[in-house]
């Protein structure tokens, strides 16, 4: 197919034995093949590793920070901690275990796979999935992961998954777009949201929440207050259709 020089080796071991590593410099190399060939040994052999980097995470400092923020809250205020993206590089399982030991109310991850990893590591604390994907619904239900619901399409598709699994009263978290405009139900969606979810036996709303767009900048204080006012108004409208209490949370997006 390609009229280029080619060499062939009977096995990965033969390749590693005969290849001259110094013959590859500043090259882009595609390594592809079945797992049985263990081609990761080739990539490891060809990578230049001039140094080793070690990240030390002070878990005592993490607990100190957790307790500090808890001291600023009312005793009945719940606490959700983000552990997405490998706990921002700090070790998802290790950090989650520590947070579970200190009884945080919720953990939150970006995608279902991160939540599955925590469940497989023995984490039983409730976990919110902030970016649930259609193909992950079955896995989320299987592992008891609670999705962020940010639109009518995802609400309807998740309902189909719950019906298929024969599950009722499944916990979900409804995101409201009060001004950040990064996913969430808008004001014109609220009536349809209520009509869809209020009489529905498959859902149990655990929380209503929203993102503040610029609460860390005083220049945006007026807009922040407008967001909070909208949030309180919309939460009241939604909650009035349910006989149970629904948690609410609105904070700045880092």
Image (spheres, rainbow, N blue to C red):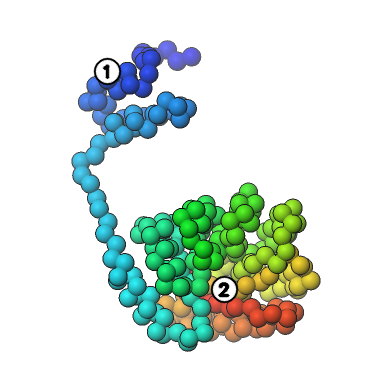
For image coordinates 72% across by 64% down, the residue present is 168
At mark 2, the secondary structure is strand
For image coordinates 27% across by 20% down, the residue present is 17
At mark 1, the secondary structure is helix
Using residue 153 as the reference point, say whether residue 219 is left or right of it. left
Disc 1 to disc 2, C-alpha distance: 59 Å
The residue positioned farthest toward the left in the image shown: 50
Who comes first in sequence, dot 1 or dot 2? 1
Figure check: 4 above or below 49: above
Q: Label 2 belongs to which residue? A: 210
Q: Nearer the viewer, mark 1 or mark 2?
A: 1
Q: Marks 2 and 1: in contact by CB < 8 Å?
A: no
* Residue 142 x, y percent position in the rendering: 62, 54
Q: How packed is label 1: few (under 14 Cα within 10 Å), some, or many (20 or more)?
A: few
* Residue 109 x, y percent position in the rendering: 50, 61
* Residue 59 x, y percent position in the rendering: 31, 67
Using residue 217 as the reference point, say whether residue 22 is left or right of it. left
Figure check: 47 above or below 94: above
Q: How packed is label 2: few (under 14 Cα within 10 Å), some, or many (20 or more)?
A: many
Figure check: 241 above or below 130: below
Can residue 67 be seen by looking at this rendering? yes
Q: Nearer the viewer, residue 211 or 198?
A: 198
Q: How many marks?
A: 2
Q: Label 1 belongs to which residue? A: 18
* Residue 111 x, y percent position in the rendering: 53, 55
Figure check: 148 above or below 164: below
Can residue 192 be seen by looking at this rendering? no
Looking at the rendered image, the quarter that the C terminus falls into is bottom left
Q: Nearer the viewer, residue 248 or 94?
A: 94
Quarter of the image for residue 57 reads: bottom left
């Amino acid at each position: 197919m390609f009229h280029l020089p080619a060499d062939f080796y009977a096995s990965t071991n033969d390749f590693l034995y005969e290849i001259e590593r110094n013959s590859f410099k500043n090259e882009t190399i595609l390594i592809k093949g079945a797992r049985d060939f263990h081609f990761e040994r080739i990539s490891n052999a060809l990578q230049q590793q001039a140094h080793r980097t070690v990240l030390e995470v002070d878990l005592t400092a993490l607990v100190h920070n957790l307790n500090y923020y808890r001291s600023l809250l009312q005793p009945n205020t719940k606490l959700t901690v983000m552990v997405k993206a490998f706990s921002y590089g700090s070790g998802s399982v290790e950090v989650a275990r520590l947070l579970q030991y200190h009884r945080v109310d919720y953990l939150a991850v970006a995608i279902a796979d991160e939540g599955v990893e925590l469940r497989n590591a023995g984490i039983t604390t409730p976990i919110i999935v902030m970016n649930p994907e259609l193909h992950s619904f079955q896995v989320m239900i299987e592992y008891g992961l609670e999705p962020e619901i940010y639109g009518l399409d995802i609400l309807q598709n998740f309902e189909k998954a719950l019906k298929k699994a024969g599950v009722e009263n499944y916990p979900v978290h409804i995101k409201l777009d009060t001004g950040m405009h990064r996913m969430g139900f808008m004001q014109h969606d609220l009536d349809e949201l209520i009509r869809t979810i209020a009489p529905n036996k498959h859902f149990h709303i655990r929380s209503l929440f929203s993102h503040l767009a610029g609460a860390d900048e005083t220049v945006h204080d007026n807009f922040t207050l407008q967001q909070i006012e909208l949030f309180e108004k919309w939460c009241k409208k939604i909650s009035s259709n349910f006989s149970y209490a629904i948690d609410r949370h609105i904070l700045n997006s880092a």
